[in-house]
Image (cartoon, coloured by chain):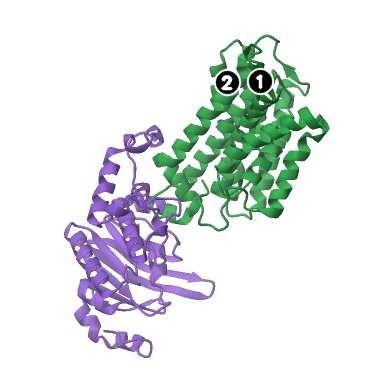
Amino acid sequence: MTAMPPKAILRLDGVSKSFGGVRALRDVSIGVAQDRIVGVIGPNGAGKTTLFNVITGAHRPDAGDVTFANRPITRWPAYRIVRAGVARTFQNIRLFGSMTVWEHLIVSQRHGGSPLRKMLPGRFADREAWGRAEDALTFFGLEKYRTALARTLPYGIQRKVEMARALTAGPKLLLLDEPVAGMNRDEADDLRALLLRLSARGLSILLIEHDMAFVMNLCHELYVLDFGALIAAGPPSEIRTNPAVLDAYLGSETAC
Amino acid sequence: MLLQQLVNGLTLGAVYTLVALSFSLVMGLLAILNIAIGELFMLGGYLGFAVIAAHFPLAAALLIGMGGAALVALVIDKIGYEPLRQAPPITPLLSTIGFSIILQNVVTNVWGSDPLQLPSGLFDRRVHIGSVQIGVMQLVVIGVTVVLVASVALLIQKTAVGRALRAVSENREVARLLGVSADRITLFAFMLSGALAGAAGVLISLHYAAITPYIGVDTGLKAIAVMVIGGTTSVWGALIVGPLIGIAEVMTIAFGGSQMRDFVVYGLMIVTLLLRPQGLLGARSDSGQPV
């Protein structure tokens, strides 16, 4: 197993989490280095989403520590972790039924200034937030959906809205839970290009994905979970031929 | 005569609208019934009375009534709701019932249980439009209600805090994972709800120039009926149903007799529950817009 990256923006040390009798995570240690794209793979039920829930504060780990940008965030409330710079998307898209695409890009933003400013309508409240939302709209090519209710849009667009919403929170680390699920090859290629552009801008990305081709072509580093335990870590070229990984996937799907 | 009753009904309806909006802000957000809202309404009325009795202007009475009720709402959230959030929904409901009884007792102790009355001639100026007489206070009630409702609508639809409120009401967990402090938004909703109830209390008690510690029960229950008829999952149902119920009530008294007045409101509520349980504007599923 590879050593923890020296300049890790996110570190998990010995994290365990059980639900009832099920040990969803067992003593898992991983790290995500600055501006890297890191993948978490593993069969269904391996604990991947639990890992995300622990990082984002949705679940508290039973043991172990989570450190983000040199700050211990293990027991922080979820909203504080987001404000520190961790944003995420969800495996099942979770957009707000009452909000337009544009509102989704505003709602996740941290508004500066006095609390009273938050009670001003529209752009008076925060011109910068407006600007960032506009940037995200352009970056994801969502301009023509600006005033559409997000939940009424096609699946692929909803995925983009969710990702754009996560990005407008201004994260240093973006967590993506199965971003290419339900996408065709072209859409997945688009997304890959987009994630590379984000990474080039200095964003660190941790993603869960089942699509092996996508992961192998994109990630700098991979972690493999099986039954809640880390069974392998390393660059895709190593993981591809790792016997433990091949073993875990045998019978369910082909690894690469 | 009919037109006259219409104006009277609108005045009453405006107050029902405010209190129903107050209920549905908390209901839409947290899916709990804050029973103490009726008493926040009553408390607002007493505070308004006290300010007027001290010879301050009406605007001051409104501000103090709203602020006072909002502060008590803060206490209710912090003591009666937040620590119990993980408990079954019946628990915070019971604790708000406790608060409402306590508030009634406190007010009875401070101001007594007999009705208080303002000296006549204070707010009973009237304007004549044709055959219709409109009290200046009626215009104030309707005007202030319109301004408050419009401000709340603007706040919810167009501001950062309003978007956060909608996010929390749709999905508290996702909202938190987007960086929204759900606890703070909840507190804000409680206080906004309290301020609306307080404003309604000031308006109605000055309009009738009288107040008792028990007005909160009657108006509170009626506002709950208005919210149910309008749809508990939509804040906006109250805007339509409030005035309608006010008019229906006044018309019933005028043409059917005062012993029938509550029959209409609660009858309509039961019919709604039977025929359209989600209310007039309510959504069937969770895909609607709660706030």
| Position in image of residue B255 (x %, y %) | 78, 30
Discs 2 and 1 carry the same chain letter: yes
Of the 4 image quadrants, the one containing the C terminus of chain A is bottom left
Instruction: Check disc 2 and report the residue beneath it.
Output: B140
Q: CA distance from mark 2 to mark 1?
A: 9 Å
User: Tag 1, which secondary structure?
Assistant: helix
Amino acid at pointer 1:
His
Closer-to-camera residue (A190/B10)? B10
Name the residue at 57% across, 16% down. Answer: B58
Q: Quadrant of residue B190?
A: top right
Query: Secondary structure beneath disc 2?
Result: helix
Above or below residue B276? Residue B154 is: above
Contact between marks 2 and 1 (CB within 8 A): the answer is: yes
Label 2 chain ID: B
**In the orientation shown, which residue stands out farthest toward the bottom?**
A251
Residue A203: x and y in percent read 22, 58
Location of the N terminus of chain A by quadrant is bottom left
Task: Give whichever of A236, A93 is nearer the camera.
Answer: A93
Q: Which mark is residue B207?
A: 1
Q: What chain is tagged by disc 1?
A: B
Examine the rendering and report whether any part of residue A32 can be seen. Answer: yes
User: According to the rendering, which colour does chain B have?
Assistant: green
A134 horizontally vs B205: left or right: left
Where's residue A104, x and y in %?
Answer: 37, 51
Q: Residue furthest front?
A: B130
